[in-house]
Amino acid sequence: MTTPNTPYPQPGSYPAVPPPEKQQVFDIRDILWRVTRYRWLLVVPIVISMSGAAIYYTLAPAIFESHVLVAIDDQAQVSGALQGLVQPDRDRDTPRERVTLVDSKVRSRRFLQELSLRSGFNRDPQVVKDAERASRRWRGVPRDEFAIRFASARLSKRIRVTPVEGTYVRISAMGPAPEEARRIASLIADILIEESKRTNLERVQARGEFSADQITVYEERLRKSEDAYQRYQESLIRNVLSSNPVNDRNIEDARGLINMAESEMAQVKQRLESEQRDFAGAANGASVPDLQGGKAIELSNRLVELESSASAAALSDKEKSDRNIAGIQASIASTRQMLLAELELEASQLKGNLSDEAQSAATGIALDRAIIRSLTLKRDRLRGLISEYARTVQSTPREDMELARLKGEVDTNRDLLNALRREQTSSRISEALETSGLGFRLSVLEPPQLPYRASEPDPFKIFAAAALLGPLGAAGIVLLGEKVRLVVRSVEQAEEELGARVIATFPRIEGWSRPGTYFQNNWPVMVIIAVVFLTGSFFALNATVFAPHPIVKVKAETKK
Amino acid sequence: MKRPQRTLFDSFNLDAPHVTEARRLLQTLARRERDESHPPKVYMVTSAGRGEGKSTICGLVSMVAARIFRRKTLVIDADLRRPSLHSLLGLNQRPGLAELMEGSASVEEATRSTLIGTLSAIPSGRPTKSVGDTYDDFAFRELLDQFRPQYDLIFIDCPPVVPVMEPLLIAEHVDALLLVAMAGATQVTMIRRMRQILAPLEPKIAGAILNNATDGLPYYYDYRYYGYESPKPKRVREIRTPAKPPSQDDAAARQVARERGGA
């Protein structure tokens, strides 16, 4: 028995079959071959799309477009000084921002409602019918409101805002009739200018009112902050006025005075001790008498005051104090003498048998005590002044900061108040400009005209889209068919699936029809013929049967 | 629309691509015969489904084998359900294989001459009973045994493998199988199913034939791409009224025509 599945049983006797070449990714000949193969299938979508475009172009309602050219930022010239006050940032608007501004204004609910009311579009029969239906469905909202809403929504779709060169903006209004398109465009321009004027006026008035309110608030704030600042300054001044004479220049002098007082006090204490011993020896154990008469007390207090004055004079300005110090020292010496004389008098008048030595010792003791007391008070006062000075030095930065804060608050409030006053002035000027008609931001450059031909449907766009979509659809169908249909498409695939070597590839016998039924082989051509026939029939019927009869048209116009 | 009735003889042109391809196929088979001790003589042509061109290829290859390779060739139409070989060869459908199986006709009656003298054909015939009852596997094997010494090559046009049982039975009696698939039309799933069915007979598969290369395969399988398309096919009338002196084939054709007229 043979082994038929091995076509080359003796490999040496035949040349080896070369392995199949890898298929190229992009082969233009293969594409052309496929185009030739699927030529009628490729034509089908193109014919369908072109026929559809032709029918759409015929059936689509004509839309007329009328436009108005508006200039934004066409403000009347004001002086340079006022320019910055009135509109400081207007030049920063880009064309796109201007278009957005106009577009948002035109499509605002308020604008569209005004437009629908003025144009009477809310009384359009179709709109009224829809509004009635909606009001029946949604109870609680009146029919007129629905009508205005629907009219506004439909009008919004008919408006288009596009930028033109410079600061110009074109506002297009569309309508099924030329007159309607022009009327809507004209109304848009009118309402837009009125709205712009009113809005600007309201804006500047609101600005002015806001500024006035804020000025009142900030005037009060400024007054309070100024009062606080002033009070603080006065308190500092008071502190300065009532302050001690010790400062950073004479603090060492003060300390020297303290040392001097203490050394003097030590000398006096030593003297006092010797006098006390003398008194004890002379008085035979009697106690030291109290020499505190009224005059002695008075002189003792004066001595204290003089010592204080002497220390104050020593700490004050040196040039002035030298003379004062000498005078005060002289007074201190005379007061001590007077005190001594008074004490001697009181000692002589003491009852008892005190010897002269005992009386003299008692007088010395009383005088030294008075001196020690005056020096002690002087020392304590100087110490207190030094301590107070140290405390003042520590608290000065905090006071400075507080002062700076209060001053800054005053400055801030004053600046804000000035800014508000400027804003108020600006709003007043702007209001005056708007009121006087000088401040229009919008002005109509070209009034709307009656369109003489429909803008839509645009035959070029429609047929261009069809010419583009047709081949794309055709290519898509072919590629999809090639990918989706799982059939034998190559020799390599057939060998793999059959498990046998392909030993012949038979072409179609020339002159014979393709395999398959007549419809399978010729359906693209049949579809093309059918589409062309149906399209032709449509146009024929449209031009004859469905065309409006001339007599009917004339009658309708007469009735109108 | 009814397809115009044409026979393979009408389109038989030695320069035609389909004839060239048939010659190439037979050349391959002939080389194999030379290299083998027991060269295959009986070939069965089948496919996965219907309408893939197996009858056309079977008839064409038979014609080329007889006309060009000068082999005494017999072609049998074993597709009793949807026969088409008789119309491709311009023969009457009956008597044929069905009548042979049913015993209502002799081998001499069923075996027809064609326009090519070395080519004989047995059409399908018209079974009076169901095909299942008519087809007799034992009788078919005896028939093949009877034909083997008489012919150099025998081609059997079989029904498709997937929907019908007979090809599997016939395949047991043949020497080799030729599988036909139509490029761009035959579903891969059907081919896989056919391969499953023929798995026990895989050693007998001599090769595969791809049909419809013009429309189903890449451009480099198309003869027209190389500028070697065949001349315009001649009409049937032109072949039947040759201007040149009548040859042996033409005499056979006249005989066939007489037989037809008699039938």
Image (tube, rainbow, N blue to C red):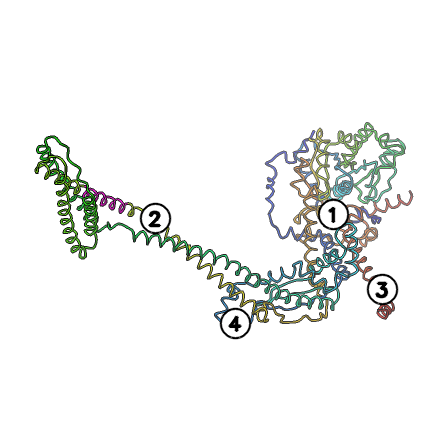
Residue at image mark 4: A78
Front residue (pair A254, B114): A254
The amino acid type, in three-letter code, at marker 1 is Arg
Residue B215 on the magenta segment: no
Q: Chain of mark 3?
A: A
Query: In the image, is A240 to the left or to the right of A413?
Result: left
Task: State if disc 1 and disc 3 touch (CB < 8 Å).
Answer: no
Q: CA distance from mark 3 to mark 2?
A: 102 Å
Q: CA distance from mark 2 to mark 1?
A: 110 Å
Residue at image mark 2: A398
Task: State if disc 4 and disc 1 touch (CB < 8 Å).
Answer: no
Residue A533 picture location, percent across and down:
81, 58
**Above-or-below relation of B203 to A266:** above
Q: Earlier in the sequence, mark 3 or mark 4?
A: 4
The amino acid type, in three-letter code, at marker 4 is Val
Q: Earlier in the sequence, mark 4 or mark 2?
A: 4
**Nearer the camera: disc 3 or disc 4:** 4
Q: CA distance from mark 3 to mark 4?
A: 66 Å
| Both labels 2 and 1 in a single chain | yes
Residue at image mark 3: A544
Around disc 3, counting alpha carbons within 10 Å, would you say few (fewer than 14), some (14 to 19), or many (20 or more)? few
The amino acid type, in three-letter code, at marker 3 is Thr
| Both labels 1 and 4 in a single chain | yes
**Nearer the camera: disc 1 or disc 4:** 4
Q: Which residues are magenta?
A: A373-390
**On residue A508, which mark appears?**
1
Q: CA distance from mark 4 to mark 2?
A: 51 Å
